[in-house]
Image (cartoon, rainbow, N blue to C red):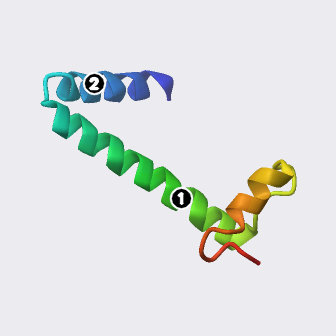
Amino acid sequence: MLRPARGTLKAWTGWLIPRPWWVKGLVLLVTVAAVASFFWLLFLISGVPGYFPDIVAQRLKKVPGLGR
């Protein structure tokens, strides 16, 4: 599993490096949005984990949909 993942990462890096800065920024923005959406959906379904520090849990509960 690691070998194909390394090949994919190398191909992706080879494609991304010569691109202009705005393409790199757009890729970063889409990646951050995808990760944030994944965790929002995860916390919406399962709730905010109890092992998070209180200050983090309080801030997460202010996010729309997670304030249960």
Q: Nearer the viewer, residue 52 or 16?
A: 52
Question: Label 1 crowding class (10 Å Cα cut-off): few <14, some 14-19, many 20+?
Answer: few
Q: Quadrant of the C terminus?
A: bottom right
- Position of residue 23 relative to residue 29, above or below, is above
- Position of residue 41 relative to residue 9, above or below, is below
- Position of residue 65 relative to residue 19, above or below, is below
Query: For this view, does 53 lie left or right of residue 19?
Result: right
- Position of residue 62 relative to residue 52, above or below, is below
- The local secondary structure at tag 1 comes to helix
Question: Label 2 crowding class (10 Å Cα cut-off): few <14, some 14-19, many 20+?
Answer: few
Q: How many badges with numbers are in the image? A: 2
Find residue 38 and name its label: 1
Query: For this view, does 66 lie left or right of residue 19?
Result: right
Q: Where residue 66 appears, x then y in whole percent?
A: 68, 72
Find residue 8 and name its label: none
Query: For this view, does 45 lie left or right of residue 18?
Result: right
Q: Where residue 22 appears, x then y in whole percent?
A: 17, 38
User: Could you tell me which residue is drawn at 13 percent across and 22 percent down?
Assistant: 18
Q: Are marks 2 and 1 in contact (CB under 8 Å)?
A: no
Find residue 13 and name its label: 2
